[in-house]
Amino acid sequence: MAPKRIEQQIDDALLATAMGAGFLYVRRRARRLLSHAAIAATVTAGLGALGTAGLVAIWQRNRTQRS
């Protein structure tokens, strides 16, 4: 009876270790993806602002030429 109990404890310890390692891996991947997503969002927002500023400048130039 004792060897079965010891095997169960070993299995539980291995499962806990595997789950802990899996949690750390998922957390690491999520952090990496979120940092890449944040950089992409910043670049996209910057390009959007630059495009908007360019459109406003073109609109202003066309508006003053018509006057």
Image (cartoon, helix red, strand yellow):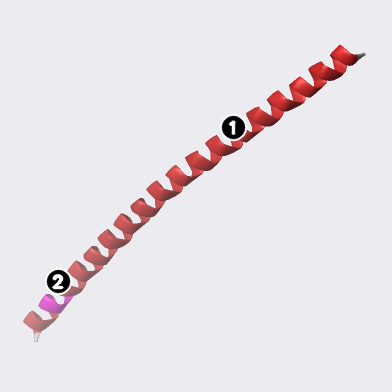
Q: Amino acid at mark 2?
A: Ile
**58, 42: nearer the viewer:** 42
**17, 22: nearer the viewer:** 17
Front label number (1 vs 2): 1
**48, 65: nearer the viewer:** 48
Left or right: residue 45 compared with residue 1? left
Say which residue label 2 marks: 58
The image shows residue 63, relative to residue 9, as above or below, that is below
Q: Residue at x 79, y 23 (%)?
A: 9
Furthest-bottom residue in this view: 67
Q: Residue at x 76, y 26 (%)?
A: 12
Q: Residue at x 18, y 67 (%)?
A: 54
Q: Which mark is residue 21?
A: 1
Q: Secondary structure at mark 2?
A: helix
Count neighbours of disc 2 (C-alpha within 10 A) and say few if under 14, some if 14 to 19, many if 20 or more: few
**Image spot of residue 50 (x, y percent):** 22, 64
Res. 2 image quadrant = top right
Q: Look at the image and give the residue range highlighted in magenta.
A: 58-62
Q: Magenta span: helix, strand or loop, mainly?
A: helix
Q: Secondary structure at mark 1?
A: helix
Count neighbours of disc 1 (C-alpha within 10 A) and say few if under 14, some if 14 to 19, many if 20 or more: few
Indicate whether residue 8 is drawn in magenta. no
The image shows residue 43, relative to residue 53, as above or below, that is above
Q: Which mark is residue 60?
A: none
Res. 38 image quadrant = bottom left
Res. 49 image quadrant = bottom left
Left or right: residue 35 compared with residue 13? left
Q: Residue at x 92, y 13 (%)?
A: 1
**Image spot of residue 17 (x, y percent):** 65, 29
**Image spot of residue 25 (x, y percent):** 53, 35
Q: Amino acid at mark 1?
A: Ala
